[in-house]
Image (cartoon, rainbow, N blue to C red):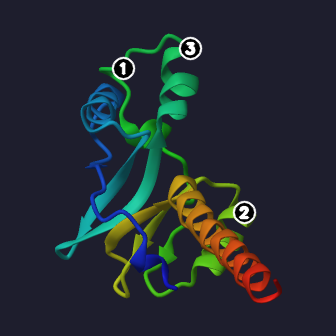
Amino acid sequence: MPVSEICNREVIIVQGNNTVLDAAKLMRQHHVGDVLVVENRNGVQVPVGIVTDRDLVIETLAPELDSNAITVSDIMVPGLATVKEGTGIFEAIQYMRAKGVRRMPVVDESGGLAGIITLDDLLELLSEELLALTKLVKHEQKKEMGSRR
């Protein structure tokens, strides 16, 4: 199954010159833990960074910086790892693990933002799959018990 089937297509985005206060307000308004920083390249929104709620705390609040003066590009995670829409779930999990990230933007063939895949999305999918397997085992046990009486 490709990541395009489970990624969240409603991604909260900001430009690099937005303040961290803008980012924090968007996170609060949309009940999310991150915003993606994008650049417009020939009409395509290309993800270039990510700012998480943890980044806001560690990089801005704890050192008591002015959240109106610091931009998201000042604190965004450099070297953003992305995954293409057609990438398989297992491969995406391995890549996220190798990069040590909990969130990864999903991009189309042109590098444009298509969505985001998160650890929460993957855990939900895997728990549903495990539940289906558990139900299969229970069903087979009942079937066997009924045929062996």
Label 2 crowding class (10 Å Cα cut-off): few <14, some 14-19, many 20+? few
- Return the disc, 1 or 2, that comes first in the chain's sequence: 1
Left or right side of 48 for 13: left
Task: Identify the image quadrant of residue 34.
Answer: top left
Picture layout, residue 75 above or below residue 49: above
Q: Secondary structure at mark 1?
A: loop
Nearer-the-camera pick, 13 or 137:
137
> Which callout, 1 or 2, points to the residue nearer the camera?
2
Hey, what amino acid is under mark 2? Arg
Q: Residue furthest top?
A: 64
- Residue at point 53%, 33% (across, down): 55
Picture layout, residue 87 above or below residue 69: below
Please give the label number shown on residue 131: none
Q: CA distance from mark 1 to mark 3?
A: 11 Å
Q: CA distance from mark 1 to mark 2?
A: 31 Å
- Return the disc, 3 or 2, that comes first in the chain's sequence: 3
Label 3 crowding class (10 Å Cα cut-off): few <14, some 14-19, many 20+? few
Picture layout, residue 77 above or below residue 117: above
Nearer-the-camera pick, 99 or 138:
138
Residue 79 in percent (x, y) is at: 57, 59
Residue 8 in percent (x, y) is at: 36, 63
- Residue at point 50%, 10% (across, down): 64
Instruction: Identify residue for label 2.
Output: 97
Please give the label number shown on residue 67: 1
- Residue at point 61%, 61% (across, down): 127
Instruction: Identify residue for label 3.
Output: 63
Task: Identify the image quadrant of residue 46.
Answer: bottom left
